[in-house]
Amino acid sequence: MSILVDKFENAVLRTEKERNKKRDPARLSISSLGKCVRQLTYRALGHRERGMDGRSALTLAVGTAMHTYLRRAFKKRFRRSKTVRIEGFPKEIETSVVVGGHKIEGHIDGKVWIGGKAYLLELKTMSDWAYRDFVRYDVLDYSYVIQTLAYMEGTGLHTAIVIGVNKNTGEMKEFFIDFEASKKTWLDRKAFLDRHIQSPDLATAPKEYGPDDKSMKLPWQCGYCPFVLECWADRKPKEESRNKFILTS
């Protein structure tokens, strides 16, 4: 029996809705460019999102709070450093790229100069399982890579340091991205988005993720998508557990 948990979850949801009420859900940002293009199409066309539960809202808020804390700590530590020069802390730096004929805006955590070389710096808080894979395979999630490459094009910086942070244990790991070495990845993604963002159309927007052929379980990218039920409506998705769906037809 729960006396207060439901009330706490409801309070978190209301707080998040209040914080985001001025955000235009149809407006694309640089942080969304690596996500499934069908999700971007639903957003651009103004479709209604699946509601977030209290647990998801709280998890998001914890990550945001840790992110803010780390940025402030970084600023305090290095603001008078003679070996590390920083820009953008604690205030983020705005930038933009043009995709599909639209100006897509975003903001980076900051710029860092070490030994005279400039780096774009991004902090990414992660769950236990996301951080585990990040360390095990030394590979950054594709959506983060695309986001960072777009930031690099917007700012003109050639090297990025992405610091992944396990928000449950506080562990950290650096990941370097060289723009020239990864330029084809960004240009291919940009060309793909150009074809679909300029004139959003669900009839032509592909599903970039799909079910496992044997189990018919949808991947986590679909499970956390706010349009998963609408996107897969013809296959009758069933939520087996929190944000985990299986197709039933």
Image: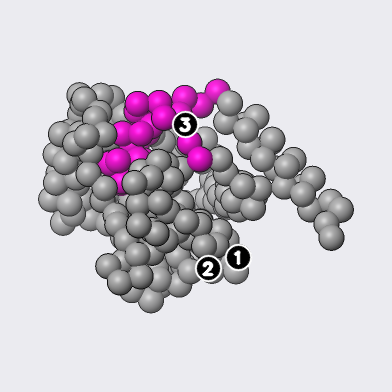
Question: Within the image, what quadrant is residue 25 found in?
Answer: top left
The residue under the point 30% across, 40% down is 38
Label annotation for residue 48:
3
* Structural distance between the alpha carbons of marks 2 and 1: 7 Å
Q: Nearer the viewer, residue 200 or 81?
A: 200
Q: Are marks 2 and 1 in contact (CB under 8 Å)?
A: yes
* Element marked by disc 3: loop
Is residue 43 within the magenta segment? yes
* Element marked by disc 1: loop
In the picture of the structure, the residue carrying the numbered disc 1 is: 168
* Structural distance between the alpha carbons of marks 1 and 3: 31 Å
Which circle's residue, 3 or 2, is located before the other in the chain?
Answer: 3
The percent position of residue 244, horizontal first and vertical second, equals: 48, 60
Q: Point out the frontmost of discs 3 and 2.
A: 3
Amino acid, disc 2: Asp
Which circle's residue, 1 or 3, is located before the other in the chain?
Answer: 3
Answer with left or right where residue 205 lies relative to residue 106. Answer: left
Q: Residues within 10 Å of mark 3 (few under 14, many from 20)?
A: few
The residue under the point 65% across, 29% down is 18
Answer with left or right where residue 175 lies relative to residue 87. Answer: left
The residue under the point 33% across, 36% down is 40
Q: Quadrant of the C terminus?
A: bottom left
Which circle's residue, 2 or 1, is located before the other in the chain?
Answer: 2
Q: Residues within 10 Å of mark 2 (few under 14, many from 20)?
A: some
Amino acid, disc 1: Asn
Answer with left or right where residue 159 lies relative to residue 47. Answer: left
Amino acid, disc 3: Arg
Is residue 40 within the magenta segment? yes
Label annotation for residue 128:
2
